[in-house]
Image (tube, rainbow, N blue to C red):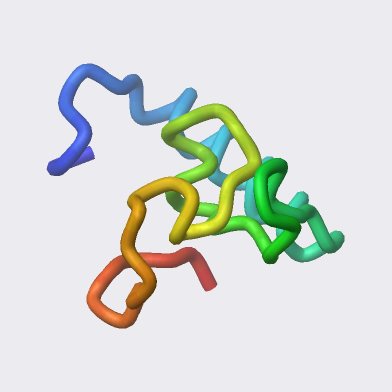
Amino acid sequence: MKNNKGYRKKELVKTLNETLTAKKNGAKCIICGAPIWAAGSAITGSNLCFTCTTGEANDSDDYEIE
């Protein structure tokens, strides 16, 4: 919520939980087929991996949901 102003907490938590479930069930990036980045996919509304969401290859400094 701190980094994503304008989101309603209850709706964001619901979307994050749904996206995390999709990831755990094997959801793949709609562009390249890699596992989705749940945190980013919840914000964008599309099943995308970290690289296809951000254009960056290294996700070691970015958040993911465990």
Image position of 26 (left or right of 4): right
Query: Residue 57: x percent and y percent?
Result: 38, 71
Query: Residue 42: x percent and y percent?
Result: 51, 38
Please tell me which residue is depicted at 49% across the width and 50% down the height of the picture.
52
Image position of 14 (left or right of 7): right
**Is there any visible trace of residue 65 in the rendered image?**
yes
Please say if 66 is above or below 33: below
Quadrant of residue 35 within the rendered picture = bottom right
Image position of 66 (left or right of 4): right
Please say if 31 is above or below 45: below
Nearer to us in this view, 47 or 25: 47
Query: Residue 40: x percent and y percent?
Result: 44, 47
Please tell me which residue is depicted at 65% across the width and 41% down the height of the picture.
47
Please say if 8 is above or below 44: above
Q: How many labels does the image show?
A: 0
Please say if 48 is above or below 12: below
Q: Quadrant of the N terminus?
A: top left
**Is there any visible trace of residue 21 in the rendered image?**
no
Query: Residue 21: x percent and y percent?
Result: 74, 53
Please tell me which residue is depicted at 55% across the width and 28% down the height of the picture.
45
Please tell me which residue is depicted at 75% across the width and 55% down the height of the picture.
28
Quadrant of residue 46 within the rendered picture = top right
Image position of 27 (left or right of 46): right
Q: Which residue lies furthest to the right in this view?
A: 25
Nearer to us in this view, 45 or 50: 50
